[in-house]
Amino acid sequence: MLIHSISILLVHILTEAENRIVDKLRLAYYDVVPADLRTFCSLTSRISKHVLDKFGIGNELMSCQLWYTNQTQNYVVGFLDQQEPSSEWNGHVVCRAGNVIIDAATQNLEVKLGVPVPWVVVARRFLVTTQLISRARLDNNAMLEWFYPPANMDTNPPVEPVALVEQYGNLLYERIAHSPT
């Protein structure tokens, strides 16, 4: 828990200009990145990281659990006790930049569970130490919440092809850099 406390103290609050870039990233993401990559959190987070790095915005990958809740449903993506072996990483990862997280793989919920969610979510982080990292209320009164992973889990996201990250990261950067302000 001490690690979380220290990182919270060092949180950079994004400037207005940085927030505009992050919003442009959200809006342009799947105009550039192929939709068939929308469930690969490690890849999509690395693409977001690449773009923000090119803009000089400090960021890092952050492993977490993604929760979807409404009055009748409760789903969790990442870091679950799996009974059967799987070739997929048992985790979820987002890109953390200052006081926000960027999740371009919320579609895991829709593709795998039939739960309608936005394709890219930018959510403000809580600036106090808690297991809950961030939350976003959806139009249907459902809630997306991101939590720190449970203890003793492999929180290292899989390595992704650098060429693919750079290809889509560079295209997305160019789209954002040349879009009107």
Image: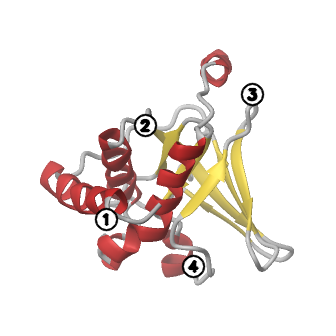
Which circle's residue, 3 or 1, is located before the other in the chain? 3
Residue 134 drawn at (x, y percent): 69, 47
Report whether 119 appears left or right of 1: left
Q: Which residue is mark 2?
A: 57
Q: Quadrant of residue 151?
A: top right
Q: Amino acid at mark 3?
A: Thr
What residue is at 33 percent from the left and 70 percent from the top? 37
Which circle's residue, 3 or 2, is located before the other in the chain? 2
Residues under numbered marks 2 and 1 in contact, where contact means CB atoms less than 8 Å apart: no
Residue 77 drawn at (x, y percent): 56, 60
Q: Which residue is mark 3?
A: 129
Q: Which residue is mark 4?
A: 113
What residue is at 56 percent from the left and 48 percent from the top? 19
Residue 32's disc number: none
Which circle's residue, 1 or 4, is located before the other in the chain? 4
Residue 175's disc number: 1
Q: Which of the two marks, 3 or 4, is nearer to us in this view?
A: 3
